[in-house]
Every structure is written in structure tokens, then in C-alpha cells.
């Protein structure tokens, strides 16, 4: 079975978020090491230098990179400040080391759940640095309960710092209307299908209809002259997007998560497509691993193989 039911995926993500379960794992060194081995396929490491080393290597091989310091739903102001400082650090190093690229993050990692003003202040602080170093700053899209707040903060910040980009989820019914308002010349936009389980009233599940919607959003962004990242591992969809005309967009690239389909990254690159690899690092690797399994259950078999063979 290639997809979990909505309930099963939500349950796995909820387990991943439970601090008591995480604590048990941390207290069991053998289990911790095994899980870490499985996560190593998708996460570059716990620390920034490990992510930067991989970023350098990929940059030298001709890929663009995105970097994410993993984290979400942070509920203390101090932890949000720490996350912002880490993102500022990685942004600065990407700029100073000449790798360029993009820093990606969840607004709920830097304050959205604590206080919107705090999130905005952190976002503007990062926007200023991004502007200084010419590095793109990309806001991820979270579950639908946060969409409105995320788009509002994005609008406020991008008006000051145009290097800020936004992720839009094709599965949400509201996205077409959002895109129609937000997308203008040179808007930096990343299209994803959507990773969160949402009710039918708010979103489409994986289907041909969702793929059609993704293509239509892409075409709108092309018409508007945007800078577009097509973030998907779906080869059939990528084939359709290739057929669409890229003429008119300010730029178009494919963006894939590190470790998910490395062979596809190579193939696309060899075919001459601009490819960006999305790298992650941080202590929250366990959460990230569970997300990747929830979104594509065959990754569980891969995780077991990595644990045993690693
Ligand atoms: P699907 O339609 O899910 O699957 C199609 C095929 O792709 C599968 O049959 C399989 O062959 C392959 N595939 C898909 N996923 C995997 C996997 N995990 N492992 C192995 N093969 C796989 N979602 C958000 O909601 N908000 C975000 O901000 C966000 N940012 C993202 C940034 C990037 C760069 C990427 C690549 C994804 C991001 N996502 C985000 C996740 C996205 O919404 C999807 O959940 C995820 O990409 C899976 O959907 P898909 O389009 O890749 O393929």
C-alpha cells in the first residue's frame, strides 16, 4: 500500500510529536542509534556544519540547495529566538561561503504559536539578513488552521524584503484564490501537493484532480512571470509539467527532498533541468523521519533496511 489512511498518517505524526515517547527513545541508546541510522538517509545531521558540508558538495555537483533547520510548533519565546538565531547563522554561512541557495522554515518554529508580532519580528530579522547576503528565505506552508496567518505574515514581510518566498499547497481548495491575489511578476513561489491531512471540505486528497490543479497553478504562475519551484517527487506529474510551456516565467526549477529520490535528481539534472535539493538538519530528525514515513509508507521498509544494514 503506497498511502496510509488519513487517520493512520495523523496517528504516526501525533506519535512523533509526543515528548514522552521521544524521551523513552532517547533513553534507549540502541533504539536511538537504529532510528538515527534510518533518519540519516533524509537528514544531513544534527548540526549546521554537517548540512553545510552536504550543501557544498551538491553545489559543486551543479545543484541548487535549500536548507531547513528542522522544527515546528515551538511554544516558548526563548526557543523561537534560538531557532531564529540558528536560521540566521545558516543564512550567514551560506552567504559568506558563496554557496548561495535558500533557507526554508516553518513560521511556527519562530513564533507563530507564541505571538504573531514575535513571528513577524523574527521574519523581518531574517529578511534583512537574506537581503544582505542575497539568499532566498522561503516560508513553508503548514496545516490549514495556520494558512491565513502565514499568508498575512508573508504579505507583510515580502513587501519589505522581496527575497522572501512562499509555499502554496495545491490540495487546499482556497489556494487558487490565494494564488490569484499573491502571484505577481517575480513572486518566489514553491508549489507542493500538501503534506497535512485535511478534511474534504478544505482539500483534495491525492488524485488526478489534484494533479490537474497543480498544473493549473503552475500555468498561472508562469503567466504571471513568477520564480517557480516545483516541489514534487511525482515523476508522472513532472512529465506533465515539462510539457507545459515554461516560457514567460522568470525562472522554473524542480525541488526535491534530500534522500527521497536521489536517482531522479540525477536523471533530471542530466536532462538539463535546474534541480534544487532540500536539505534538513537538526535535533528534531526523529519528527522529520516520521513525517517521511507517514507521507509514503514504503519508506518504512527502507528505514528498516537502513537500520539493519547501517
Ligand atoms: P505524491 O503524490 O505523494 O506521490 C507520488 C509518487 O512520488 C509516489 O508514488 C512515489 O513514487 C514518489 N514519492 C512521493 N513521496 C515520496 C517519499 N516520501 N518517498 C519516496 N517516494 C516518494 N508540504 C507542505 O504541506 N508544506 C510545505 O511547506 C512543504 N514543503 C516541501 C518542500 C519540498 C522541497 C518538497 C519536495 C515537498 C514539500 N512538502 C511540503 C511536501 C509535499 O506537500 C508532499 O507531501 C510531498 O512532496 C509528497 O508529495 P509528492 O508530490 O512528492 O508525491
Image (cartoon, grey):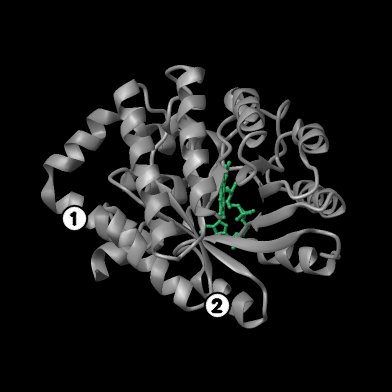
Ligand 1 contact, mark 1 (Cβ < 8 Å): no
Depth order, front residue of 242/274:
274
Q: Is residue 94 left or right of residue 128?
A: left
Q: Secondary structure at mark 2?
A: helix
Marks 2 and 1: CB-CB under 8 Å?
no
- Residue 2 pos. (x, y %): 56, 55
Image quadrant where one finds the C terminus = bottom left
Q: From the viewer's perspective, tell me whether residue 238 is left or right of residue 306.
A: right
**Label 1 CA crowd tier, 10 Å (few <14, some 14–19, many 20+):** some
From what the image shows, is residue 30 above or below residue 144? below
Tell me how far mark 2 sits from mark 1, CA to CA.
29 Å
Determine the residue positioned at 82% across, 51% down.
212
Q: From the top left corner, tell me how far across and down residue 20 is, in percent.
A: 23, 29
User: Could you tell whether 85 is left or right of 136 in the image?
Assistant: left
Vertical placement of residue 68 versus 63, above or below: above
Q: Which residue is mark 2?
A: 266
> Residue 102, percent across and down?
52, 54
- State the quadrant of the N terminus: bottom right
Identify the mark nearer the N-term, 2 or 1: 1
Camera-side residue of 177 and 224: 224
* Residue 258 in the image: above or below residue 24: below
Report the residue marked by disc 1: 33
Amino acid at each position: 500500500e503506497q498511502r496510509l489512511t488519513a487517520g493512520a498518517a495523523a496517528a504516526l505524526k501525533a506519535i512523533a510529536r509526543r515528548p514522552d515517547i521521544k524521551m523513552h527513545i532517547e533513553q534507549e541508546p540502541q533504539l536511538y542509534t537504529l532510528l538515527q541510522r534510518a533518519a540519516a538517509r533524509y537528514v544531513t545531521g544534527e548540526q549546521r556544519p554537517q548540512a553545510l558540508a552536504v550543501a557544498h558538495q551538491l553545489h559543486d555537483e551543479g545543484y541548487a540547495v535549500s536548507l531547513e533547520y528542522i522544527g515546528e510548533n515551538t511554544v516558548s519565546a526563548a526557543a523561537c529566538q534560538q531557532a531564529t538565531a540558528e536560521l540566521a547563522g545558516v543564512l550567514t554561512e551560506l552567504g559568506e561561503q558563496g554557496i548561495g541557495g535558500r533557507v526554508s522554515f516553518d513560521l511556527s518554529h519562530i513564533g507563530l504559536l507564541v505571538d504573531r508580532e514575535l513571528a513577524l519580528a523574527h521574519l523581518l530579522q531574517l529578511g534583512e539578513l537574506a537581503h544582505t547576503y542575497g539568499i532566498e528565505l522561503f516560508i513553508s506552508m503548514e496545516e490549514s488552521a495556520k494558512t491565513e496567518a502565514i499568508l498575512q505574515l508573508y504579505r507583510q514581510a515580502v513587501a519589505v524584503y522581496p527575497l522572501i518566498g512562499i509555499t502554496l499547497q495545491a490540495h487546499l481548495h482556497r489556494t487558487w484564490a490565494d494564488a490569484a491575489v499573491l502571484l505577481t511578476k517575480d513572486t518566489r513561489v514553491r508549489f507542493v501537493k500538501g503534506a497535512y491531512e485535511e478534511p474534504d471540505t478544505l482539500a483534495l486528497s491525492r488524485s488526478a484532480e489534484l494533479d490537474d490543479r497543480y498544473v493549473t497553478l503552475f500555468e498561472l504562475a508562469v503567466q504571471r512571470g513568477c520564480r517557480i519551484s516545483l516541489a514534487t517527487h511525482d515523476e508522472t506529474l513532472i512529465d506533465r509539467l515539462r510539457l507545459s510551456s515554461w516560457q514567460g516565467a522568470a525562472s522554473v526549477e524542480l525541488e526535491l527532498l534530500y534522500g527521497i529520490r536521489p536517482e531522479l535528481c540525477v536523471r533530471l539534472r542530466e536532462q538539463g533541468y535546474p534541480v534544487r535539493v532540500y536539505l534538513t538538519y537538526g535535533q528534531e530528525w526523529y519528527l522529520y523521519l516520521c513525517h517521511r514515513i507517514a507521507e509514503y509508507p514504503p519508506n518504512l521498509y527502507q528505514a528498516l533496511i537502513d537500520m539493519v544494514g547501517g
